Amino acid sequence: MVQSIAGSFTKVVRRWLPDAFLFAVILTFAVFAFGILFKGQSPVDMVKFWGQGFWKLLAFAMQMVLVLVTGHTLAKTKAVESILISLSKLAHTPAQAIVVTTFFAMLACWLNWGFGLIVGALLAKQMAKRIKGIHYGLLVASAYSGFIVWHAGISGSIPLKVAQVSKNFMSRITGEEVIPVIETIFTWQNLLLCLFLMITLPIINKMMIPDPEDIVEIDPALLEESAGETEERPGTTPAERIENSRVVSMLLGLFGFSYIVCFFVNGGTLGLNSVNMIFLFAGIVLHGTPANFLKAANEAIKNTSGIVLQFPLYAGIMGMMVHSGLASSISQWFVQVSTPVTFPFLTFLSAGIVNFFVPSGGGQWAVQGPIVMPAAKALGVPLGKAAMAIAWGDAWTNMIQPFWALPLLGIAGLGIRDIMGYCVVALLWGGGLISLFLLFL
């Protein structure tokens, strides 16, 4: 039954879902119309809101470009490729490849979401290279489905933000100074939900394997990519000798890792910037020479166009959602119809809807936090549970939001239509399981 459902969704998606760029364009026009129809904003005001937000994600877009480039470049080293091959050897059949890829992608996303996106994509690609008969679109979708647990993990932006002592708005809106992670990420309910998903989602993904005649393996062109490392050349000019010098790479690597060690010794935490920095300097060292590293980086940069072109559009959508009041109206409506029992579940649903138009954990918290948290305190709902309801909602609808899939798709060499039908099934299964936990636990 799961296979037929996935097949039906895949057919619909392939027929009706536009390219990820056009998807962002359609969302732009939809939010523009919603602001006029439901909030009484004028067309001129909505255009202004769009323009005000258009460049708000520039720094984040650059971070995501680096996630893709540094991760892809590191994967082209012989050392990392050997690790990926070792992990891929845990699977011997297409079904086992789906299960192993889903599990490790999910575990990696729980540890750090940026790391998880890259690891999932790279492992999927290695599995497809080694094991014949894998439906590549489902394999990549399985890797992306691991992203559903990121906001319940130790890099989740909302639980980490409410646990910060300094510059925390919690004391201003609820009287609570902080919500420690023991009341959010490390509650037994949250950990149990993550465990349930890690056990069941790989099985659900395996059940979606299509019939043999419908299987589409990895494109041979992706298997023929040039390796990142080449034979060292002594060089005939001073410039060529520098480009092929291991000394330059080792010194630069020492410089970078010295800072990274100091950063963590002084209390720094694993975030997007630190992951990118580790990947960058690890790639420089492991490639051996600047020439090898630059060759791999230039190859990786070819896959970044989706991020560069689409993130400004999503920033404009966020600007219209926030400044027009659409985002806060969605949250307020769900709060108004809630009871102490249904509040976490309805908050989760509202967060899932808002995330579709504001696909940023930090941006979503800024919109929903000031509405949800005071309401939770008034209803007697634990604040940690309310915060995690927003976090789970934010992670949930990422399954059908192309925004976060772009780096993974860039590495995998696929388009959004190739994976979205399978991701809808992950959305339905994950949404049902999360809803049960929020209602009864």
Image (cartoon, helix red, strand yellow):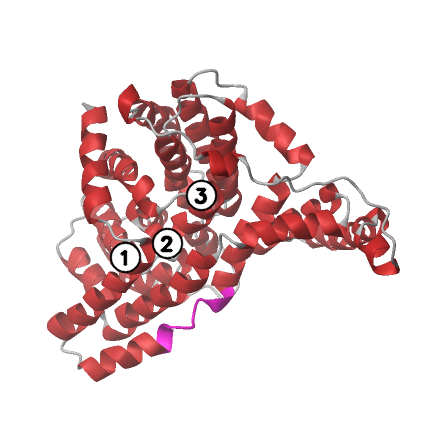
**Which is more foreground, mark 3 or mark 2?**
3
Residue 263 at x, y percent in the picture: 69, 54
Q: Which residue is mark 3?
A: 413
How far apart marks 3 and 1 lie (CA) works out to 19 Å
Q: As drawn, is 352 to the left or to the right of 178?
A: left
The residue nearer to you, when weighing 227 against 34, is 227
Q: Secondary structure at mark 1?
A: helix
Secondary structure of the residue carrying tag 3 is loop
Labelled disc at residue 403: 2
Residue at horizontal 28 percent and vertical 71 percent from the top: 320
Identify the residue under disc 1: 23
Instruction: Using the image, determine if residue 196 lies above or below residue 379.
Output: above
Locate residue 209: give its quadrant.
top left
Q: What amino acid type is highlighted by mark number 1?
A: Phe
| Label 2 Cα crowd, 10 Å radius (few <14 / some 14-19 / many 20+) | many
> How many numbered discs sit on the rendered protein?
3
